[in-house]
Image (cartoon, rainbow, N blue to C red):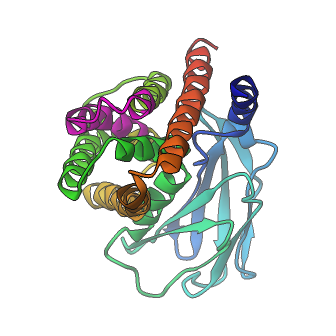
Amino acid sequence: MKKIYFFFLFIFSFCIHSHEFNPAHLILNEESDFSYSVKLFYPQQYKYNSPEILYPSNCITSKVSKSSNIKNIIESYKLECSEDIKGKNIRFENLEFLTDALLSINFIDGSSYESIAGSRNLEITIPFEQSVYPLAYFNLGFDHLLKGVDHIVFLICLIFLVFGFINLVKVITAFTVAHSITLSLSFLGIVTISQSVIEALIALTIIFVALDAVDSRNKKFPWYYAFGFGLLHGFGFSGALSEIGINNNELALSLLFFNVGIEIAQLAIVPIPFLIIYFFNNNKVFQRIKYLIAMSIGGIGVYWFIDRVIGIFI
């Protein structure tokens, strides 16, 4: 029976992607009245599934030139409009593969606007009045955590090791403080580590907490390695933010809102498994289920680790 279980776990691992955060970034810089230079960034792996942008009917685009860097395809062109685009709609098509698209508009008067489109909200209406807060980065942070399966399964295993509300607060606080530190340091370029190495180490943290969750004897002080592992996960969060970039004059605020979005998503996830464990932890059937979940997460973590280590050298 165990052999069959691990066989299906191995096959299932190939179907699970640790990150489904593949954002595009559309940047419009107004150079003169109603005339914009445009750059569209999207990941290299989606060059045959690039997003299609539908502008207001009063706008026309010039010929597109394409270039690329290590991570992205870059499309550059001009957008000429006969009137202001404020109050008009910009629609994103073909976002089935790209999970999000960030729109950044820098107007000639010094104001700017940012918003995010996804598969469920393809159309963005540009408001007449611009917000002073970069709320789009809050949405990006929130989406990143919810779509980052590796971060979620790490949190679940961490909760398996926690008994009592006070201990939960210690663990979540330690993890939050730690990843906030490295998210900021890494994005600002103060500390730099290869993203491929970080992703492999994150998979290793998943294996570690999964093994600890399987062994019920090691539950006493999870907060300190929650802090240590949080430092690694912060580098992962920074890598996701670096992929899309910050194209406004509010760097500190954008970074803060991205981090707050991550925290809110984290707080939305944590109570459910914690309450389930709190009420059913003494149940023998639940203990067996918890064991299988921890083993499954550990097995998937092993697959991710091997896959990412191979990716470092390819």
Residue 213: in magenta span: yes
Residue 50 appears left or right of 271? right
- Specify whether 138 is left or right of 73: left
- On the rendered structure, is 310 left or right of 229? right
Residue under the image location 37 percent in, 57 percent down: 274
In this view, the residue farthest toward the right is 48
Give how far across and how far down residue 144 sits, in percent.
49, 53
Q: Position of residue 41 (x, y in %)?
A: 61, 48
Q: Which image quarter: residue 82?
A: bottom right
Query: Which of the 4 image quadrants contains residue 239?
Result: top left
Vertical side of 227 occupied by 145: above or below: below
Check residue 117 for magenta coloring.
no
In the depicted view, which residue is nearer to us: 213 or 133? 213
Percent coordinates x, y for residue 80 in the rendering: 66, 71
* Count of marks placed on residues: 0
**Residue nearest the viewer, comparing 154 with 239:** 154
Label the magenta part by its dominant secondary structure. Answer: helix
In which quadrant will I find the N terminus? top right
* Residue sitting at x 46%, y 43%: 151
Q: Magenta residues, as a range?
A: 210-236
The vertical placement of 193 against 121, above or below, is above
Which residue is at the front of the view, 62 or 145?
Answer: 145
Query: Could you tell me which residue is drawn at 25 percent across and 52 percent down?
Result: 168
**Which residue occupies the extreme top position in the image?**
313
Which quarter of the rendering shows the C terminus? top right
Outermost residue on the front side: it is 284
x and y percent of residue 221 in the render?
Answer: 20, 35
Residue in the image at 30% along x and 38% along y: 230
